Amino acid sequence: MRTKLSAWTEDELLRLLIVAREHNYRHYAMFLIASLHGLRASEVVSLTSGNFADGFLRVARLKGSRATTQPLLESKNELLNEKQVFEKLLKETKEGDCLFPSGWCSAKENRPMTRYGLNFLCQKYGELAGIPKHKRHAHCAKHYTGRKLADAGVSIEKIKLWLGHESVQSSVQYLQCTDEQAAESVQGCF
């Protein structure tokens, strides 16, 4: 049985980013890049300075997905201005070092955080941000991206390419109605 799609709303994402930024700038950057590029937890934590060049992010996607090369996005909303965030972060990171090191190792070791660590942070910051419990996991970032693009009217083929999906069937799920959208439509009917 297929699990129900859980995607953050725009408001939930913004609250999560604010809370994460208040606690740790790199944690905030992790959630930001995951949400704008639809990255899996394992893809986010494996990023190094080598994944970035000339204002672009290059990611070897996992689970049989295609590698992607995407521009770092700019936004009038300072919280979502990814290009500015990563310019700052990359200046603070040594060449070849992981961007999101584990808090359990010394700075010399420079081992990346695990996907479990990222999910732990998602639970912690999600609770502080008032995000419903069923949405306190990092994969909601990928679903947020797909839903955001679908709701904006981006073609399914472009969503497929942005998310690195090999098959359009993986992208079709983002065209389905969410529980929140159904509830909003039903409000006032009874």
Image (spheres, helix red, strand yellow):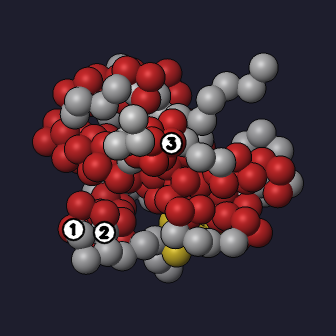
Q: Earlier in the sequence, mark 1 or mark 3?
A: 1
Which circle marks residue 81 in the picture? 2
Badge 2 density bin: few <14, some 14–19, many ≥20, Cα 10 Å: some
| Residue nearer the viewer, 27 or 140 | 140
- Residue 49 location (% of width, % of height): 48, 58
In the rendering, which numbered label is found on residue 182?
Answer: 3
- Kindly check if marks 2 and 1 are in contact, taking CB atoms under 8 A apart as contact: yes
Verify CB contact (< 8 Å) between mark 2 and mark 3.
no
Image side of residue 38 versus residue 131, left or right: right
How many angstroms separate mark 2 from mark 1 (CA)? 5 Å
Tell me the number on the disc at residue 78.
1
- Secondary structure under the numbered disc 1 in the rendered image: helix
Secondary structure beneath dot 2 equals: loop
The quarter in which the N terminus is drawn is: top right
Please report the residue visible at 19 percent of the width from the left and 39 percent of the height from the top: 19
* 55 and 5: which is toward the camera: 5
Q: Residue 128, position in %: x, y?
A: 20, 27
5 or 52, nearer to the observer: 5
Q: Is residue 180 above or below residue 54?
A: above
